[in-house]
Amino acid sequence: MTRPVVAAVLAAVLLTAAPPDRLTAQDSQFSVRGLGVPGRWESVRARTAAGAFGPFDPRSSVADVSLADALQLTATAVEATTYRRAEIGGTQDDLRSSRFPFMGLAGPVTRRVVVGGGFATYLDRTYSIVTRDSQMLRGAYASYTDRIGNDGAVADLRFAAAARLASWIAIGAGAHILSGSSRQTAQRVYDDTTFLGTTQTAVVRYDGFGISGSVALDPIPSVRIVGYGRSDNRLRTRLGDTETDRADLPTTLGAALRWSPSPSARVAGTAVWRSWSDAGGFNTTSWSAGAEVGAGPTPLRFGVRGGQLPFGPGTAAPTELGVTLGAGKGFSGNRALVDFGLERLVRKGGGLTETAWTVLVGLTIRP
Amino acid sequence: MKRVALAALAAVTACTEDVTAPGHCPDFCPSGSISGVDTVLQTVVQRDSAFRGFVRPHEANTLLAATLPGVIDSRAIFRTLPIGDSLVVESSTGAMGAIVGVDSLKLALTITRRDTSAHNLTLVYYRLPLGIDSTTTFGGLGSWTDSLRSLNADSVYALAGHVDALRDSVFVDSTTHQMTVIAKLDSAMAPFVPADSGQVAFGVRVVADSRASIALGSVESGLGPRITWFAEVDSLGKDTVPRSASTGDRFDSFVFDLLSPSVDTTLDSTLAVGGMPVARSIMRFALPRAIRDSVQISRATLILVTARPPEGVPADSFTLAAHGVVADFGAKSPLSADVSRVATTRVHIGVARGDTVRIEMTDILRSWQIDTLAPTALALRQLPEGSEFPEIRFEPSTNTGLGPALHVTYVRRFPFGKP
């Protein structure tokens, strides 16, 4: 194998072997119930166009076939800081968090075949809930504060390959190891200090497996159509050596269209359906549309996305609507790329309205 | 400008986190919840027994003197160390001279505990035979009618300078509130007997306007009786010179006469604590496995029902301790040195039969959860032992419904790992 290939494989192994703990994409109060909130498998470049370019972006892991465009070794990472406001029942709470939700590496092994890997958030499971109540203890009501927290995520470790079969067609496939853990905490503190507070903690581990496949067609040079699918088997939850839960995971089907009317302008749109009812939630359909203007080192990106969240109270799936804006800057002859952007999200469901500003920073290296 | 932009970017993307929000249940709360349980374990103590003789009077830290009509009559006794038959008359040469007589003797006693509501607290001094020892009994010392003298400590303390005309004096330590009573005994009251090398033995009785009960410091506590001889010493055949010699006591104890059948020291099935000789009770707990292994304890209270209340004056109120043991060897169970395995409460004189005495023992139960090899047994004891006469007895575990119970408040194991 050539030296870049060896470097690519080695880097892929190192990147995927030990994902950081703070992997979650974006915390949400909708992650309190069910399995959590699905993460975004997008680089900052794709995410600042609302994810519309995700299936076409070799730095993202939405569709494996996009790796076929990674003609040189490429490594990318994302940092996201979210300022969130949750409003329910006339009360509002301002929350914030910083995460590293995505990291990827890709590089060609032959002229036609590209391999890649990395990790992304599959399900976000981070929250901390505080409740107040009282209980009759020893003849009197004792008030207490409960804090139940969950800090962690399920990560999607991807190993994928793509091949360009002809100038108008490429295919890709990938294997996904779902792995993760969360530190769960249950704490009770009584107002009456004669009752000692209690704190229980446990580290819960998750595992699962999935496969994915995708195809990209270029019917004309300015248009690309991508179809992709993914099937994940189940998410097993373990506490120590004991399996505490097992949930089927959804099948994902998606399609995307990109039109490049000129070298400096691209627009794209995607639609994705996921069978989250397999996991006890709502089936979801998400869409996005975005554009990227500017072919040089400082493109401008924007987009809008909408869809549903799989878990929430009531009989209808919570909804999500977001707009994004971003840009990028190349350095050292585009060997280093810094992408940055802003995302505004509104999520609604079960009486809860959650709004969030997310500052996105991405770094891409092409050695 | 670039630096400002970079600084702003770093500021907004800095790693900060606040994900805590009020829960709106049940829609936006986890499916599992923290479950608190409050229950009384009536049969958790399954074996118990009482033992006596842990501290005997001559081993106690205090010498108990009490005149409680109808209850108890107790008197302190002690024997001093010898001073020899001669004293130094010439300090530069160390020349010794024989003691040819004494002028007087000062006897200092420290009252470590007293009932300040008992007025005219008076100490009555008796001369006792030198043969007193740990086997000496109240009755064995005769009728106690030939007192040497008495000293009204309250009256002397009320005088200017706390000294009376006889040169008796009384001092009260403002920090410890201990009272030191120094009584002067003349040579007729305390003659120097050369054959005894100056050893003397005394008995002390206490009386007051109301019921009197005091504790005197003993040699074990370092506050034992002290005497100072004021002697006449032969100055090498030329004359006699006054010299003094101080010494402590060699043996001290107290003897008592139980006047009330309610303070009978005979052990029965009840759980006796305190008294004299000191009694302890051992209780063995059979905790449910769920409580020992799987829950977090917020509060645990040992509930004891009084079978026989303690008798005495309010100052005789004492500390009751539930003390974890290192190993369960019955009466000889060694007590744990770990302070987290000691729980205490105050038992006040006035507790009636049927009243409950509660001891908070949350730390002890938590320590049993941590150290699963530790014996789940407790020794009920008085603190400090041998410093009070009152004895309390509790209903045993064999008395269904009234036996020791454990009121425990705990939180069940949280259902981690559930979505």
Image (cartoon, helix red, strand yellow):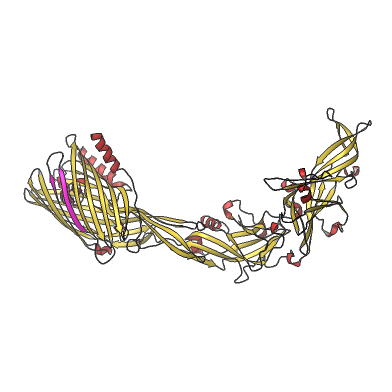
In the foreground, B389 or A14: B389
Callout count: 0
Q: Is residue B79 visible?
A: yes
Q: Is residue B391 magenta?
A: no
In the foreground, B11 or A248: B11
On-image quarter of the C terminus of chain B: bottom left
Q: Could you say where residue B76 lies in the image, as x and y percent from the top left?
A: 79, 53
Residue at the location (51% across, 61% down)? B292
Prevailing secondary structure of the magenta residues = strand
Q: Could you say where residue B182 lies in the image, as x and y percent from the top left?
A: 79, 45
Q: Is residue A157 visible?
A: no
Q: Is residue A292 magenta?
A: yes
Q: Could you say where residue A35 lies in the image, as x and y percent from the top left?
A: 30, 59
Q: Quadrant of residue B281?
A: bottom right
In this rendering, the answer to whether A294 lies above or below B76 is above
* Residue farthest to the right, as pictured: B237
Highlighted range, magenta: A290-307
Q: Quadrant of residue A79?
A: top left
In the foreground, A325 or B207: B207
On-image quarter of the N terminus of chain B: top left
Q: Quadrant of residue B67?
A: bottom right
User: Is A211 displayed left or right of A215 in the figure?
Assistant: right
User: Is B178 displayed left or right of B397 in the figure?
Assistant: right
* Residue farthest to the front, as pictured: B160
* Residue farthest to the bottom, as pictured: B400
Q: Could you say where residue B346 lies in the image, as x and y percent from the top left?
A: 63, 58
* Residue farthest to the left, as pictured: A220
